[in-house]
Structure formats: structure tokens, C-alpha cells
């Protein structure tokens, strides 16, 4: 058919399953396909179903059926539909997000088609209920087959079928052939349609994915896997065989074969009784239902008329389903243990993709440089219509949807026994990082195997994506930042065999990745020198980091119109950030200028010297200037934005930064910034043009530059304006997002 704008009508027939229905309706918010409507046909429900549906008035189509007959409900659903394809799912089912995209492939690939369906997970997601099912003309089905069915000929003894919970039909074909035979109140209803459509020249096709999760809930017909209402099952099996063998099998076969098929049910009853699955009372009841069913099926099969419905023209116009991005993804999608090893790419268009980011922290539940840029990338790429996932450890819930980004907590994976216990206890850092990387890879592989993602991006730090980089077919990108060897030197860590092994794993991660993204030329050169990587043969792209412009919602509240001067530091109070250099300069500045105030924001409980924090050391040594030097501790994102808006000068004398995202946070607010001539910082700040750079470890030069900015307001404001211009030209979120997407597509193509 190859219709780009193929429309779908998702029909859900429900009867007294309020708890399951609401879950199913919520799951539709995560379908990646856009052009669909939803129809719910409510049987004679007596539970909360009506109350639930009232909340969806205007968003979905709602139809009522006074009879407990599934085929009648399905025909009412067809009549209420206006999509090109009518897609039936059960009220206890959860579709995978790319379900409709993959179903659409069947209609695009086959010029003549009556319907198509995919695989169905059983309860718990650890097994399949259905894949590539076929049925013979007597109603005996084989619902778990490895290869897609080839039974598409009009005259045959076997036919491709779908399971009702995951069955879609060409609306035109349904209307031409009378929809569902309303004789089937339950069981074989969808198989009968598949056979009739195929015999009418509209064959059925199987998709090897297009997954549906089915809870197989109890109902008025089904209370357990044994205690079913066997009367309609047996009746409909006999009826099915008699009706659908007409014109194919002899009259003698049609007379005898339906009984032999039904008799297999009776043998099952006896087997269950022997095995203790049912008791004697159950068995007697089942046999009574079986006898009634056989008799009724024969009478209606030979003498009754089909109850097809040729009055199914649409009663309503198409009602597009408006998704609610605040609804979290259903856990059934993440908990399935069995998934096919084949991989089918997203089908929105050739440049569409699914990407997963790894970041141990994710705002607002965790902060840091990686967390900040990951959030910007994830939300920006999602806004462009791509599927985006983030695996983290900082969220309060297992699965959340934050601004269209599916955020998954790595602890969703329960590791019964760590697999890296062979490492000795003194390898604590390596063991911890490998265990985390392994747990994350289980989620990544599940997302990849189900077709949700084709791309993984991970930071170099803690080599979070190392294990995932071994997944065959997955494109893995590592974004370079401060390597372990540099961090250890800056922090004065004791270099040992544990850190040495971790640094070697960093190198292995880089070399095993599909591509490398460097945030600065300096960090690329630094890592190349430290790890002996020449970068030849490794696909590497320079993509500087960028930030969302938060300054547009804030009035510049700096003290430029008063004598007071606010100086701000943001970052962890650790040696690498140069906080000791700043405090050395602050002592002299406070003695010289009584109108200045230093605000120190960031984690301040880190041991600095002799087990004491630098905050404790400073306040003990310089008690007279504690009012001018304020330690704020960790601050919220909102408070950080306020501090940036209100400061006059931003200072971060870091000994090393692979990039220096914190400077951009101040530059976007038009603040004069002071950094160091180290790492990737000079690639952001051009000395005396849009900021000032001190030589590394030079607190005296820092003091001089601070004094210069305090006493020269015009110069301070000029640097701030140029800093703002630099940010707007080179370091916006859109620049980073666009360049990242180009990198993904270039490598993929």
C-alpha cells in the first residue's frame, strides 16, 4: 500500500475489566506512531469501566454494547472507526511503543493484504503466547511457529491467523466481507475473519516483532487456564470447521472431522483430571458443556446462516488521539525477559532513530556536568521526534517520563548475584563500575532487541557503556571528558592497581565504541597522550557542549547599580576545581574591598586537607571574613540560576576542565568570567575578549584580575556582553543537539 499517512483506528473491546482497561489506555500514550484514533466498545460492564471512560470523553470514541458478545463489539468498533487500518487489542494488553510503526511495514510491503499482526508476550513477559500462528480448516491452530506463515492462497487447508489481542485489518477488506461473524461470542472470532479474508483474496501476514504484552486477565468466560466456559469454545470450533471447510473438503470429511477435532478437548479434560489440575466436579461440568457445544455447533454449522454484518460504514469522523506525555511507561514493557535476537530499525523515516543515554545522575534528581548536558541532549532530541531513553541511578521511580524522555532507573535490574565477584575487594572502584555497566547493558540490550533504540551514548567517566559496547549491531558512542588519570592527579588520589585497571578499561571502552565524540580538542589530545591513542581509524567528531538559555526568564539582577559586588563560585569544593586558589585570593580581596561578597556554592563536605573540609579549615583560620565569604553548600537548579543572575563576576580557577560547562552557565547570563589557561577552558574563554584566564596555580594573578573587575565596571560589563555573544553564537543547546544528530546519522549511514 505504501501510504505515508496511513491512519489507524485502535479498537478495544472491554467487559468488566476496569483495572486492566485503564492501564491499557495509558499505555497508548507511548506509541511512537502519531496518526491513530482510539475506540473503546464497552460491553454490559457493571464495574468502574463507565467511570473510567468518562474521563476520556472527547479524546477517544466510546461505544456501548448491551450484549456480552465479542464479535458484536468488534463490529461496533469497526463501525465507529475511520482509520485505514482497524487494529484490535485487548483490554488487558500493552503494546510496545513502535508497534504501529512495525505493523505499518506489513501494509507498506504488501500490495494486496487483508491484515497483519505481530508477536504476543504472555503474562510476565517471559514467554510468547503467539507468533506466526496458522490454523487449519477444522479449527486446529499452531500458534507458536519459528517462521512466518506462508498460507496466503485463497484455496488451502491452512491459513495464516493472528491472535485477537494483536490483530489489524484493512478496513476496506472488513467492510467488503461483512466484518466479524457475530455467531462467535468468543473464541475463533479473529481466526474466522482471517480465513474469510484470505479466501476473498485479502491474505494475512505476520510481523516478526510488533510486540504486544498480554496479561490474559480473568473474565466472565475465563477464570483460570482450566476453568473456562467450554461451551462456546467447543461450539465455535465445530461451527468453524463446518463453515470454513465448505468448498475445500468433502461432505463426509465435514461431517466427521469437526467431531474428531472437538474430541481432543474431551481428552484434555481427562488428562487434567488424572494430573489433579481439576477435580471430578469440574470434569463433569466440562463434559456437560462439551456435549452441548458439539450439538449446537453441528446444527448451526450445517443449517444456520452466518451472522456477518455488511452495514459497517463509519458513523463518526476520525478523532486523532492526543498523547499525554506525563503518563509513565508501563513496566510490562521493561520486564519481559525473552525477546528476539533480530533487530528491526525504526520506520518513521530514514533519518529517524532511537537513542539511549547513560548518565548516573539526571536532573532534577542529580546534578553534575554529564547530567546537565545529557538532559539537554535527551530533551532536545526527543523534541525532534526521535525515541529517547536515559538510564540513570538517581530517579525516585523505576520508570518515568520527563518531557518526552523515558527515564529508566538501572536498579530496575535485580542482580541476584554479582558477576564480577572474582575481582578482589581492593578492586572496589573497578568492580563497582563494571557491575553498574553490566546492569545498564541488560536494559540497553532489551531496548535494542525490541527495536526501540539503534544508538547508545555514554560518558567516558566510569565507562558506563563498556559492556553495552559489546552488543552486536548497536552503534555506541563515547563522549570524552576528564579521564581518570587526570582526575586522580588533580585530586591527589593514591594511584593503585584498582585505578590502573579502571584507566585501562576507559581505553578499551574508547577503542570498542562505534564512534567518539569529543567536547574539546584539548581533551582529545590529553587522552591520546595519556593512553597512547593516535585516533587513526577511530571515527571522532568535535561537538562542543551547549546549554539551554535560562537567562531569558531572568532579569539581570547584578549589583551594577550599587557599590556591592557579588562574586560566585560553582562546583565541588575539591582540589581539581581550584577552590583553594580562590580562597587564597578572597582573603586579600576582602581585606581590600569591604563591599564584596564571595558566594561559594557546591558540595562542601569533601575532605581537603588532613581529613578536614576546606570550608571548615577556612572558617577556622579566617573567622573575621565569614560574612564576606559564604559557603552555601549544594544548591538546587533553581537556586543556581538565581545565583548566576544576581552575581557580578563568576570565578572558577579549575586546575583542569575537559570543557568547562560551568563557564557557559555564567556566560549566558552576560557575566564576566575568570578561568584558567588549562584543559579545554581556552576553547571557551578568549582572554581579555570575553573573559579572563589566569595561569594555572597562580592565586596572585587571580587576585589581580578580580581586583581589576571590581574596580572597572565598564570593563566588567563589556566582558560580560562579549561572553553572552560567544555563548549565543557557538554554545547554545540547539548547536549541540544538531551537531550530535549529524554525528549519529553520519556514522549510521
Image (cartoon, rainbow, N blue to C red):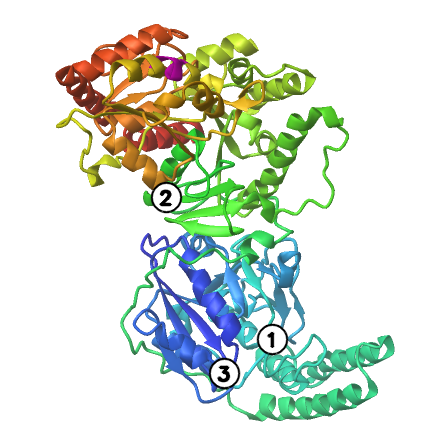
As displayed, is residue 329 above or below residue 729?
below
Task: Residue 382: give its label.
Answer: 2
Q: Is residue 628 above or below residue 50?
A: above
Q: Main secondary structure of the magenta part?
A: helix
Q: Nearer the viewer, mark 2 or mark 1?
A: 2
| Residue occupied by mark 1 | 248
Q: Quadrant of residue 701?
A: top left
> How far is mark 2 from mark 1, CA to CA?
53 Å
Circle 2 packing at 10 Å, graded few (<14), some (14-19), many (20+), is some
* Foreground label between 3 and 1: 3
- Give, as a single range, the part of the protein colored magenta: 581-585
Q: Is residue 638 visible in the rendered structure shown here?
A: yes
Q: CA distance from mark 2 to mark 3?
A: 38 Å
The image quarter containing residue 621 is: top left
Image location of residue 287, percent across then percent down: 76, 89
Q: Residue at x 41, y 19 (%)?
A: 622
Q: Is residue 498 magenta?
A: no
Mark 2 or mark 1: whose residue is earlier in sequence: 1
Amino acid at each position: 500500500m505504501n501510504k505515508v499517512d496511513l491512519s489507524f483506528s485502535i479498537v478495544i473491546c472491554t467487559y468488566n475489566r476496569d483495572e486492566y482497561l485503564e492501564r491499557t489506555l495509558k499505555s497508548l500514550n507511548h506509541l511512537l506512531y502519531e496518526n491513530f484514533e482510539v475506540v473503546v466498545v464497552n460491553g454490559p460492564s457493571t464495574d468502574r469501566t463507565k467511570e473510567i471512560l468518562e474521563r476520556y470523553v472527547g479524546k477517544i470514541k466510546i461505544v456501548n454494547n448491551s450484549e456480552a458478545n465479542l464479535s458484536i463489539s468488534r463490529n461496533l468498533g469497526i463501525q465507529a472507526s475511520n482509520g485505514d487500518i482497524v487494529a484490535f487489542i485487548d483490554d488487558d494488553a500493552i503494546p510496545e511503543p513502535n508497534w504501529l510503526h512495525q505493523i505499518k511495514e506489513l501494509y507498506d510491503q504488501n500490495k494486496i493484504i487483508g491484515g497483519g499482526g505481530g508477536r504476543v508476550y504472555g503474562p510476565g513477559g517471559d514467554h510468547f503466547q503467539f507468533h506466526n500462528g496458522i490454523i487449519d480448516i477444522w479449527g486446529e491452530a499452531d500458534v507458536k511457529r519459528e517462521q512466518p506463515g506462508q498460507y496466503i492462497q485463497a484455496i488451502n487447508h491452512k491459513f495464516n491467523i493472528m491472535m485477537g489481542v494483536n490483530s489489524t485489518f484493512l478496513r476496506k477488506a472488513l467492510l467488503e466481507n461483512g466484518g466479524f461473524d457475530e455467531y462467535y461470542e468468543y473464541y475463533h472470532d479473529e481466526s474466522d475473519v482471517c480465513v474469510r479474508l484470505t479466501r476473498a483474496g485479502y491474505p494475512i501476514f505476520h510481523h516478526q516483532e510488533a510486540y504486544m504484552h498480554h496479561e490474559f486477565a480473568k473474565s466472565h468466560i475465563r477464570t483460570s487456564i482450566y476453568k473456562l466456559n467450554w461451551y462456546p469454545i467447543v461450539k465455535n470450533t465445530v461451527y468453524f470447521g463446518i463453515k470454513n471447510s465448505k468448498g475445500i473438503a468433502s461432505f463426509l470429511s465435514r461431517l466427521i472431522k469437526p467431531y474428531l477435532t472437538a474430541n481432543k478437548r474431551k481428552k484434555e479434560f481427562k488428562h487434567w483430571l488424572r494430573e489433579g489440575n481439576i477435580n471430578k466436579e469440574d470434569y463433569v461440568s466440562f463434559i456437560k458443556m462439551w456435549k452441548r457445544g458439539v450439538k449446537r455447533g453441528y446444527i448451526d454449522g450445517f443449517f444456520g446462516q452466518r451472522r456477518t454484518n455488511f452495514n459497517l460504514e463509519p458513523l463518526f469522523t476520525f478523532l486523532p488521539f492526543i498523547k499525554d506525555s506525563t503518563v509513565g511507561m508501563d513496566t510490562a514493557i521493561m520486564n519481559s525477559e525473552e525477546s528476539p535476537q533480530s533487530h528491526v530499525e525504526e520506520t518513521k523515516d530514514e533519518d529517524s532513530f532511537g537513542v539511549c543515554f547513560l548518565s548516573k545522575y539526571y536532573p532534577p534528581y542529580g546534578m553534575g556536568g554529564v547530567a546537565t548536558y545529557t538532559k539537554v541532549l535527551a530533551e532536545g532530541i526527543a523534541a525532534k521526534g526521535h525515541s529517547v531513553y536515559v538510564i540513570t541511578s538517581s530517579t525516585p521511580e523505576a520508570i518515568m517520563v520527563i518531557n518526552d524522555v523515558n527515564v529508566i532507573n538501572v536498579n530496575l535490574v535485580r542482580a541476584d548475584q554479582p558477576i564480577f565477584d572474582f575481582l578482589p575487594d581492593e578492586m572496589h572502584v573497578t568492580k563497582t563500575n563494571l557491575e553498574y555497566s553490566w546492569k545498564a547493558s541488560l536494559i540497553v540490550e532489551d531496548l535494542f532487541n525490541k527495536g526501540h533504540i539503534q544508538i547508545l551514548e555514554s560518558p567516558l567517566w566510569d565507562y558506563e557503556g563498556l559492556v553495552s559496547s559489546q552488543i552486536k549491531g548497536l552503534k555506541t558512542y563515547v563522549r570524552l571528558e576528564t579521564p581518570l588519570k587526570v582526575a586522580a592527579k588533580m585530586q591527589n588520589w593514591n594511584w593503585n592497581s584498582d585505578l590502573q585497571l579502571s584507566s585501562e578499561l576507559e581505553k578499551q571502552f574508547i577503542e570498542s565504541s562505534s564512534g567518539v565524540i569529543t567536547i574539546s580538542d584539548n581533551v582529545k589530545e590529553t587522552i591520546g597522550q595519556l593512553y597512547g591513542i593516535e585516533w587513526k581509524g577511530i571515527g571522532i567528531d568535535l561537538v562542543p557542549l551547549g546549554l539551554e538559555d535560562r537567562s531569558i526568564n531572568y532579569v539581570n539582577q547584578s549589583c551594577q547599580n550599587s557599590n556591592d559586588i557579588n562574586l560566585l563560585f560553582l562546583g565541588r569544593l575539591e582540589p581539581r576545581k581550584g577552590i583553594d586558589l580562590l580562597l587564597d585570593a578572597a582573603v586579600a580581596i576582602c581585606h581590600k574591598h569591604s563591599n564584596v561578597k564571595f558566594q561559594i556554592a557546591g558540595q562542601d563536605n569533601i575532605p581537603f586537607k588532613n581529613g578536614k573540609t576546606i570550608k571548615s579549615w577556612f572558617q577556622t583560620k579566617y573567622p573575621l571574613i565569614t560574612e564576606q565569604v559564604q559557603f552555601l553548600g549544594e544548591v538546587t537548579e533553581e537556586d543556581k540560576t538565581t545565583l548566576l543572575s544576581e552575581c557580578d563576576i563568576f570565578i572558577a580557577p579549575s586546575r583542569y576542565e575537559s570543557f568547562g560547562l560551568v563557564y557557559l552557565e555564567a556566560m549566558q547570563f552576560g557575566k564576566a568570567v575568570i578561568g584558567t589557561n588549562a584543559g579545554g577552558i581556552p576553547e571557551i574563554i578568549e582572554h581579555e575578549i570575553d573573559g579572563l584566564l589566569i595561569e594555572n596555580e597562580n592565586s596572585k594573578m587571580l587576585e589581580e584580575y578580580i581586583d581589576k573587575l571590581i574596580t572597572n565596571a565598564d570593563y566588567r560589563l563589556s566582558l560580560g556582553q562579549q561572553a553572552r555573544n560567544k555563548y549565543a553564537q557557538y554554545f547554545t543547546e540547539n548547536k549541540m543537539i544538531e551537531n550530535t544528530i549529524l554525528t549519529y546519522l553520519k556514522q549510521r549511514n
